[in-house]
Image (tube, helix red, strand yellow):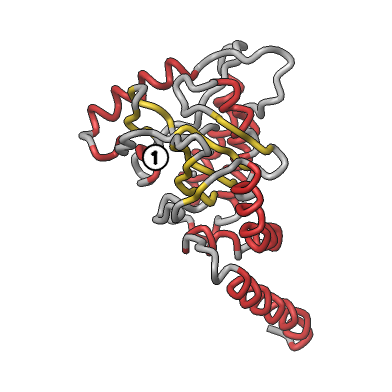
Amino acid sequence: MPDAADAVLAPRVWDSLALSTKLTERTMAFTVPDQLAAVCRKSVERSAWLERLPDTVRDLERRWSLTLGMPFTGEDVSCSWVAPAERADRSSAVLKVGMPHMEGEHEIHGLRFWDGDPTVRLLEADDELGAMLLERCVPGDALRAVPEPEQDAVIAGLLRRLWRAPSAPSTFRPLSAMLAFWSDQTLADAERWPDAGLVRQGLELFRELPYSAPSTVVLAHRPARRERPSGAARAMAGDRSETLRRGPRL
């Protein structure tokens, strides 16, 4: 690489290292799941969100009169800080603070729309912070723990209950916008494609199919996908039978 480019990039590298060190010091007394921290450090906006997160959680804990447990960890926890909570009346709940990302923009609105059927109930929310106090699924067994044919039956039943038409005018993002976003993300990784022709054909279908659907508009949760371990985990067993644990994106 030319020397001039090195001179431009070097300060950025040091700035990134300094920010990482600052975040580590700031969050040392506050547990942040490794996967969430790794995702946040890939962008300046999300790094800033992560730096504010301890104060955000403490403010929500005070404002909503919560006693929080240790946050959930694991490979599923990559887009939100999520922890069990006990309310002032001793009832159980879950606090979720979403990392800024396109797929989670309408999560709170979706949970309000479905109002507990078949999702968990939204007990409190702060739209500006992307913060939610959610009904806790009990016992909370992940769907991926059962055989795949049983998963299919549960997911099919949930989807039938999810597909409802929102009132007009709707503020929800159309499926075509989400698919275009995913296509752009895939195109950004074009150098890693093992079969560029096949991938491009798939992306063309990805963009065209939403426009071939009937004109009826329904709201739908992003489907669970077995190839991602987190997919089937989003459907959980609760007191009110099978329930999706979050809105339109843990």
- Comparing 18 with 185, the one in front is 18
Residue at 60% x, 75% y: name it: 25
Q: How many marks?
A: 1
| As drawn, 221 above or below 38 | above
- Comparing 21 with 210, the one in front is 21
Give coordinates of residue 16: x percent, y percent: 67, 75
- Comparing 168 with 33, the one in front is 33
Image quadrant in which the N terminus is located: bottom right
Give coordinates of residue 124: x percent, y percent: 60, 33
Give the residue number, with chain letter if any, for mark 1: 231
| As drawn, 77 above or below 151 | below
- Comparing 111 with 197, the one in front is 111
Residue extending furthest front? 89
Q: Is residue 205 visible?
A: no
Q: Is residue 167 visible?
A: yes
Could you classify mark 1 by the number of other residues whose Cα lies within 10 Å: few (under 14), some (14-19), or many (20 or more)? some
Compared across the picture, whether 174 is left or right of 162 comes to right
| As drawn, 165 above or below 206 | above
Q: Quadrant of residue 50?
A: bottom right
Give coordinates of residue 31: x percent, y percent: 50, 63
